[in-house]
Amino acid sequence: FLGAGGGNDIQWCFSQVKGAVDDDVAEADIISTVEFNHSGELLATGDKGGRVVIFQQEQENKTQSHSRGEYNVYSTFQSHEPEFDYLKSLEIEEKINKIRWLPQKNAAQFLLSTNDKTIKLWKISERDKRPEGYNLKEEDGRYRDPTTVTTLRVPVFRPMDLMVEASPRRIFANAHTYHINSISINSDYETYLSADDLRINLWHLEITDRSFNIVDIKPANMEELTEVITAAEFHPNSCSTFVYSSSKGTIRLCDMRASALCDRHSKLFEEPEDPSNRSFFSEIISSISDVKFSHSGRYMMTRDYLSVKIWDLNMENRPVETYQVHEYLRSKLCSLYENDCIFDKFECCWNGSDRQVEFSLIVMTGSYNNFFRMFDRNTKRDITLEASRENNKPRTVLKPRKVCASGKRKKDEISVDSLDFNKKILHTAWHPKENIIAVATTNNLYIFQDKMN
Amino acid sequence: MLGKGGKRKFDEHEDGLEGKVVSPTDGPSKVSYTLQRQTIFNISLMKLYNHRPLTEPSLQKTVLINNMLRRIQEELKQEGSLRPMFVAASQPADPLSDNFREAQPAFSHLASPPLLPADFVSTMPLESCLTPASLLEDDTFCTSPAVQHDGPTKPPPPALQPVKDSFSSALDEIEELCPAPTSAEAVAAESAADDSKAQPGESNIHKPEGLPESRTAESKLMDPLPGNFEITASTGFLTDLTLDDILFADIDTSMYDFDPCTSATGAASKMAPVSADELLKTLAPYSSQPVTPNQPFKMDLTELDHIMEVLVGS
């Protein structure tokens, strides 16, 4: 397990990078979500073009003990297509907003992928054998003349080149008027929730023609709308508990046993505004872009524009820890508002843990200029790293980066005004068990590992 | 960086117009605060109305920008400011912007947020959005194929309105979306509506320096923000509008009347082609110069056309 506060900080090294090399980014290639499966063997990405690409980790080579298996393409399929809503005269984007894996129950793998309106359950299965030796058919499929059949034999399975097939098993549609921002699978592994701007629905994985609305914050008069749902997640252990975050920086915890429609929260997490930091943009930067429970479920982490906050579920009035991701942007909020960057939705993730005990100790989140940040809750140290092809010597430890907020810029520091705001890292994922991370830049996927010795 | 009006020192006031906000009551910094507020107000308006995506704009973004505008409006109300906010003249390559600048004084009182045409056109009864496929089967007029989906779906349990005929639903939408303003604003709206038959709903106007405005003009700007939450077809009011588009489009100017009473009939009435000249004539009394009809029309006309076709089954 990773250095759990033992004084050994993880040393991250470049491992791989996937995606086009050229600077000219095709819109469809923009990565929109990244997710490891429960074992970490598979890594899925979704993109703006509606495609899902799954990478598989090579089985560890016992002789090559200094590096973990590489991730190679396992399956690629078109999950969603663009659609047209005729009544509104608008396109429905095929961009994959979220992917969530189901725990593996048999040989096949299952994942949920969603765009703005429709969720799909995909089955990814391998085929490496095929039956040969039919009595009535030739090998090429043509039927044999029955009169030529003089003996009977039992068809046998013979090996063939591995084929990975993805097929849509369920399509959950027509339940969301607004744009789906989250899906979360319940710990019962039978149900899941999907959340859009104003509503959260509960589905059963087997049933596609019915979903139950469990949260509805749509006001009777839309002119009164001032707050939307930004993210939602089920509790990792309690199958009747979930949280959802809002654009006003609040998180509500709901218990589905309390009532059918969970419009009244059981808990409301909100930090009072810091009056010394008030600005026109206070509300916008307080909007929560991601919420993630810790492995034990005792804590949850939220990401707003400038910070990551850790909340103890037992304390509603303020977070237990706050980490500044890029405080130097606070003085640039007006420009960031003008160029829309202030609306960027950064995600956050916990380190992996092979136990359900509370080992959620490191949080990771992205920033601009292809920088990403990690905060160690134990040591209170943080580090800024860069996902760039310039650093792509495997096994070379990544050099920490530093942004110079004001004043004299030291060597190797980058000044705030030189940051490239088009290079944003919104999606990151941490292997569930090992120190392997996947970091998505606009159209490339970087994989980093810790330096094993 | 935008809107740097006040002098600023490097270190202490580096934030200048950004970052920390000076209390509006501070003497010399009040100017920079006001300037900052005005800049942000302008930017917010531009964001809401300049945007014409092919897909639905993000509701979260719209809500946040709206909240920003509302807060600023509230502040202005409380300050009792008589200076309405106008968009800075930063619209590039706008063939009509000059006209708008010149016609500005008259247009200021028409500056209420453009609401209806785009709104009404692009909305549909919300409950029925949840089951577009199965509802569509029942609608007599509907020509669009079942959108997207495999298999029929049942509406989810939440409170459902009785399924209405889509035509009357659309009418309800129009009425619903007429500004439901407070009484003070209603008065202003009424007076503005009476004044102008053709409501350009222009929000991007250029302000001549130091022009005093009437209270009515002020309250026009205080009108409830469009919300635009139902807007799916975006309100791209400054998109490329050419005179040709006006000339060759069927226009029913009653659609642009803000008077809630007439909107229903407006929707029901057959659209009569109106030439651009007639439009110009209706606008002429309000400006000293001939002015080209506002750009909102372009977006709205196309949308309007489309929905009218659907409604009357032509």
Image (spheres, rainbow, N blue to C red):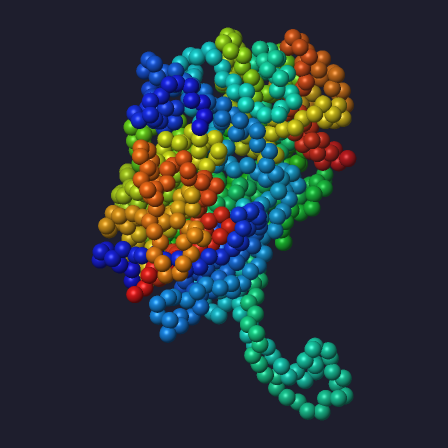
Spot the residue most to the front.
A411
Farthest-out residue, left: A6
Q: Is residue A438 above or below residue A149?
A: above
Q: Nearer the viewer, residue B124 or B279?
A: B279
Q: Quadrant of the N terminus of chain A?
A: bottom left
**Nearer to the camera, B165 or A112:** A112
Question: Residue at position x 54%, y 14% from top?
Answer: B207
- The residue drawn where x is 54% and y is 46% is A116
* Residue B33 spot, x, y in % from top left: 38, 19
* Residue shown at the point (75%, 88%) measured from the top left: A148
- Residue B149 in the image: above or below residue B285: below
Is B269 placed left or right of A2 in the picture? right
| Residue B188 in sight | no
Which image quadrant for residue B121? top right
The x and y percentages for residue A37 are 43, 60
Is residue A423 or residue A239 the one in the foreground?
A: A423
Total numbered labels placed on residues in the image: 0
